[in-house]
Image (cartoon, helix red, strand yellow):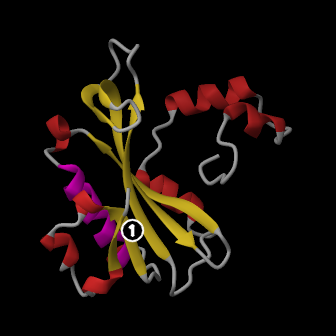
Amino acid sequence: MLISQINYTLTNFADHTEKFSQDAINRYLTGEKITPHLVWENVKGQVAQIAEGYLVFDDTVVDKNFSFKMDLVRRQWSGDAPGIIKGVGVVTCVYVNPALDQFWIIDFRLYDPQEDGKTKLDHVHDMLANCVYQKELLFRFVLMDSWYVTKEIMLFGELEKDLLLPAQG
């Protein structure tokens, strides 16, 4: 489920697994904390790296307008709404192999500035550093919304300016 490129639902997983029912999986996930490290541990053996690969950074707000007592829910801008909604902010890092036309979620951060004091830009910087220095991923391009492109990000580490291309739109 962590690495599916098509259908991410519990019911789809249960339909394709004889050992587990949807309810059993749901009970497990309710008590399990899925961390960025766990995501990487589960996907790293499947990522088909190439020198022309892409790292894609993006943020999203998971709509929780009907939630009243859920941790991490805060009022924030959602481009899907578009407007201010109650939701959980998530910054993601996806590895893309354009030759295979495949992608893998390799990292994420929950946007919770009251807890960790980090901005979305801080999270992108941390994930980029992790991709370069810990994961040692092969890639040629970094794609992100243009507002992420700051001098610090552009001059990060040994990366050349031409590696970082702001996405349009």
The answer to whether one can see residue 72 in this image is no
Q: Is residue 42 left or right of residue 20?
A: left
Q: Residues within 10 Å of mark 1 (few under 14, many from 20)?
A: many
The answer to whether one can see residue 80 in this image is yes
Secondary structure that dominates the magenta span: helix
Q: Is residue 85 above or below residue 135?
A: above
Q: Nearer the viewer, residue 9 or 149?
A: 149
Q: Nearer the viewer, residue 107 or 25?
A: 107
Percent x, y of residue 71: 31, 25
Q: Where, by quadrant of the figure, is residue 113 drawn?
A: top left
Is residue 152 covered in magenta?
A: no
Q: Residue at x 38, y 73 (%)?
A: 142
Q: Is residue 28 above or below residue 121?
A: above
Q: Where, by quadrant of the figure, is residue 68 drawn?
A: top left
What's the residue type where badge 1 is placed? Leu
Q: Is residue 14 left or right of residue 160?
A: right
Residue furthest front in the image: 169
Q: Residue at x 38, y 54 (%)?
A: 58
Percent x, y of residue 7: 69, 43
Percent x, y of residue 109: 34, 49
Mark 1 sits on what residue? 143
| Total numbered labels placed on residues in the image | 1
Q: Residue at x 65, y 70 (%)?
A: 101
Q: Is residue 59 left or right of residue 139?
A: left
Local SS, label 1: strand
Q: Is residue 146 above or below residue 89?
A: below
Q: Residue at x 21, y 71 (%)?
A: 153
Q: Quadrant of the C terminus?
A: bottom left
Is residue 131 covered in magenta?
A: yes
Stretch of the chain drawn in magenta = 119-132
Percent x, y of residue 133: 33, 78
